[in-house]
Image (tube, rainbow, N blue to C red):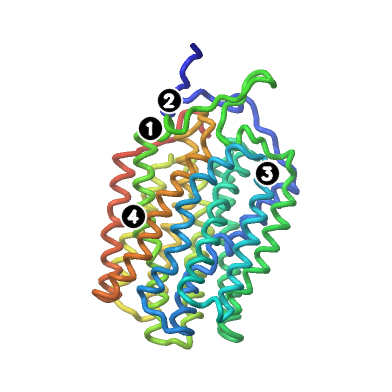
Amino acid sequence: MPPAPQPAENPPLESHASAPFHTPSGRSQRGLDGLNFFLADVRDGVGPFLGIYLLTRFDWSAGQIGLAMSAMTFATMLSQSPAGVLLDITRRKRLLTALATLVVAVCSVLMTLPAFVNLPSILLLQALMGVSAALLLPAVAAITLGMVGRRRFPARQGRNEVFNHAGNVVSALLAGLLAHFLSIEWLFYSLLLFACGSLISALAIRETDIDHVAARGAVAQETTDAQPHASGLLQVLRDRRVLMLGAALTLFHFANAAMLPLVGQYLTLGDQEAASLYMSACIVIAQLVMIPVAWWAGRRAMSWGRRPVLMIGLLALPLRGLLYGVSNDPVWLLLVQALDGIGAGIFGVLWLIVAADLTRGSGRYNATVGVLGTLFALGAAASNLVAGYVVDASGYVGGFVFLAAFGALAPLVFWFGVGETRSADAD
């Protein structure tokens, strides 16, 4: 009988651990930078602006808005695991990324047509955007891992997030200005520009610069004709630390996903005319904080380890939720929003690094990222759905306190259930 594959906790070392990984071309590195920049707007669709659009233009209730916004995250949840499995198999990662961006852009424009602004149509369009978005984050992570290898992945992932947050700043400013001076529908049209940029950037990455064995976290063999080592997906998912990481991700996203949309609606109650500008300011403030935080987190994850850096990000979330409930003054809410830059800035870098640590050598990195993505998409979808009805029942302050209570559980689960994941030869 053939020997059983090694468990996820003790995977075989990559061949790149003792030999330097290839250096990708400057064109591919610039393409990856551009891809992260432009996907910042495309990956999340119209995000919290959808709530403002439906509230101000069509007088939808908080419950209806929550249902509409949860459709994208539920679709992402159902598609994330198949997307991860597909990315472990296919070498067409660039093409899939390009196609997904086009679907998101077309759906966003259709939402501006009155014939499509009804609950069934919005749910369908949000679902299509969710299926496409399911491919984008793991595809970029896989391309990155395949380009730079495991040793340089933390620093490169930090750089990815820097460009991603810079793209969010530009797209939020553009959307806010267009919505304020032209009409709110123009924030949907701005996605077309970013989709074109994403398409060009994806195709600028040279296929020869992507090591598809490394991109799936597999073990490269000594001979070129040997198949790379791959563990069974269920074997990887039975790893207790992978399960606990999934639980921490779910709790974090359940607490986090609805906070910014609720802040946008909270601000709208005070001043509908300036709502889109306030929302843009919320996003821009958080993203400006995320840029240096992401750069810092990628490097500190290599020197400090993963756990202490990630704990800072996890603890910022419940504090933010509690502070939102203190006042609905726009200046106060904008100041508190800086905490989102710390929490999400660290989290966006670290969770993919931790997942790479836990699946090292298994050959199932993308599939595992897909399953973990399903779990936190479930948390995000439930967040938007449940929080809307909590606000209907107890007001916005009650909604923020409710979300903060769940956010306080995520750091406990990670500290005791996952722990430090950096290995001695990781960096």
Q: Residue at x 61, y 25 (%)?
A: 220
Q: Residue under circle 2?
A: 7
Q: Are marks 1 and 2 in contact (CB under 8 Å)?
A: yes
Q: Earlier in the sequence, mark 4 or mark 2?
A: 2
Q: Residue under circle 3?
A: 92
Nearest the viewer among 372 and 146 is 372
What's the distance in space between the residues labelled 4 and 2, CA to CA?
Answer: 31 Å
Q: Secondary structure at mark 1?
A: loop
Nearest the viewer among 292 and 134 is 134
Q: Residue at x 33, y 44 (%)?
A: 414
Q: Earlier in the sequence, mark 4 or mark 3?
A: 3
- The numbered dot on residue 315 is 4
What's the distance in space between the residues labelled 1 and 4, CA to CA?
Answer: 25 Å
Q: Earlier in the sequence, mark 1 or mark 2?
A: 2
Q: Residue at x 31, y 42 (%)?
A: 415
Is 232 rendered above or below residue 272?
above
Q: Residue at x 51, y 66 (%)?
A: 124
Q: Secondary structure at mark 4?
A: helix
Q: Are marks 3 and 1 in contact (CB under 8 Å)?
A: no
Q: Few, some or many C-alpha atoms within 10 Å of disc 4 (few <14, some 14-19, many ≥20)?
A: many
Q: Amino acid at mark 4?
A: Leu
Q: Seen in the image, is 343 located left or right of residue 210?
A: left
Nearest the viewer among 224 and 19 is 224
Q: Seen in the image, is 345 located left or right of residue 26?
A: left
